[in-house]
Amino acid sequence: MNIIRRNTSRSWSAVAVIALVALGGALPLPAAHAAAGCRVSYTVTSQWSGGFGAQVAVTNLGDPINGWRVTWSFAAGQTITQVWNGTLSRSGTEVTVADAGWNGSLGTGKEVSFGLNGTVNGSENPSPSAFTLNGTTCTGAVVLPSPTPTTPSPTTTSPSTPTPTTPSPSPSTPSPSTPSPTTTSPTSPTSPDVDGATIVPDPSWTCGTAGGLLPPTLGKPVLQATLRQDAVREVGATQYGTRRIRNISGGTVTGGRVSGSVLTGGLELDLTLSNGAMETEGLQILRTGDGTLIYLRSCGVAPAGTSTVRFVPDFEAPTSSSYAWLNTGTFVGTRVIDPTGTVSLSIYDVSGVSATSTVRLKDPAGTAQQPWTCAAASGSRGASVFTENVTLGSSLSVGASKRGTRNIIPITGGSMSGRLTGSVLPGGADYQLLGSAATLDARYVLLTGDGEFVIVRNCGRMGALVPTFEARAAGPYGFLTTGSWLSSDPGMGAGGVSITIYERR
């Protein structure tokens, strides 16, 4: 547990956000002299002994560009070992990350982001202090081109030279033929202009709405939740895609009919596919002002090139409470994460809403499909693999709801021994359905002694629990993602329960 606290503290204290905008037009430009400008945020999302993870978000404040490259230098000898959603190149201490092809188009005001893992020398990991986008320094304002230095000759009539009778001749003015968000091709998986369109997810991740996720802001506001993010953990490239875990340490809920707080221990699980699209899952517990507990599990998607996740919230509220209407409503929400790490959820009632355009998402060919439901397996237990001693918080009872009686037991930490050694991280819970045969659904994260994250889902009826794992596929625990396993039922352990994972034969 000492390892956990030290790493968690370092990763959070290392978070640095740098916002800068362009002040110069050094970028080689075509004769049209496009306006230039950019803003970059660089956030250290996690840090461990000898290494770190970071997220870089770039906003184009100038004219649209097709093909981007972001360049900076590290001041303390840091080295990048992995990049996703971009292409890495180096020249001495200078680092350049260019687009990955599918995300090369960057319109005015649009944001693109990429992630990276790196190594550090010693304990120092200062954030870069200067960035350029396609050669233009990013520091905040848009620089309009000056026609004087680029005018070929005083006697040459240039269409880009402003005249007193033409107040707005700048070629940077968008063409009237530029499509609006509502006319973007509905089959384009990389278009960020989806605000007014229905998003139809890949059939493997429908979020319970095979017909698609309607534009939420066309509906009626239900609630706004602001979540505090206390750690971001980069798992890396797993069997499904590039996985990131966001740990939630509480928050607030506001709205006309629902208000209260978000309890600590929630998880937001983000999966970025090789085509840049994202699939997300959220697990949160809400407590209303009158003390009612509501379980919120969300399923979301984001097309490539967008930073706003659209999700379907699945509420479980007590059927005997004044919030029972949440169990049967038709809701869609948006999730936005600001540079400080605050996660904002806005949920709307979209009953009766319709949209005229559609954006269809398609997973890349050959992509392993992450599951939404519990795994099932037969067979008998073979050799033991490792044992977890999991510490637990006080039980939280939602009570009778739409799926049965929901009981939630928060996971507060623990340890493991065997082929895996290390710690059980605080966060997540066992989301139990009680009845004649209890069904367990435990969701949590392990941190191995050598610094790898492993996501665990241990699910099923008592006596037939089947665990599944998600880990860095090329890492030392990739075998967990391809093997078949069985779990013991929880037994009494130090401060909580003891669970042993077995090979399945």
Image (cartoon, rainbow, N blue to C red):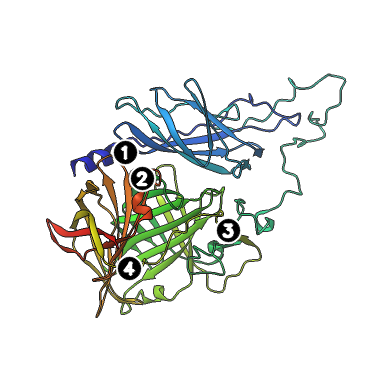
147 relative to 197, above or below: above
Q: Mark 1 highlights which residue?
A: 11
**Mark 3 or 4 closer to N-term?**
4
Q: Earlier in the sequence, mark 2 or mark 4?
A: 2
Label 3: element kind: loop
Tell which tag, 2 or 3, sits nearer the viewer.
3
Q: Amino acid at mark 1?
A: Ser
Q: Nearer the viewer, mark 2 or mark 4?
A: 2
Q: Sequence-wise, which precedes: disc 3 or disc 1?
A: 1
Q: Is residue 6 above or below residue 312?
A: above
SS at badge 1: helix
Asked if the residue under mark 1 is in contact with the one under mark 2, i.e. CB atoms within 8 Å, the reply is yes
Q: Which residue is mark 3?
A: 361
Q: Of circles 1 and 4, which is in front? A: 1
What secondary structure is found at the residue carrying circle 4?
A: strand
Earlier in the chain: of badge 1 and badge 4, it is 1
Please tell me which residue lies in front, 65 or 260.
65
Q: Is tag 2's residue or tag 3's residue first in the polypeptide sequence?
A: 2
Q: Which residue is mark 2?
A: 232
Report if the CB atoms under discs 2 and 3 are less than 8 Å apart: no
- How many angstroms separate mark 3 from mark 4 (CA)? 31 Å
Task: Work out how far the residue at label 2 is from the one at label 4, CA to CA, in angstroms.
Answer: 24 Å
Whether residue 158 is visible to the viewer of this picture, yes or no, is: yes
Report the residue marked by disc 4: 294
Query: Residue 276 location in percent, x, y?
Result: 54, 48
**Whole-number angstrom distance, CA of label 2 to CA of label 1:** 8 Å
Tell which tag, 3 or 4, sits nearer the viewer.
3
Residue visible at 49% across and 62% down in the picture: 205
User: Mark 4 is on which residue type?
Assistant: Ile
Q: Are marks 3 and 4 in contact (CB under 8 Å)?
A: no
| Quarter of the image where one finds residue 397 | bottom left
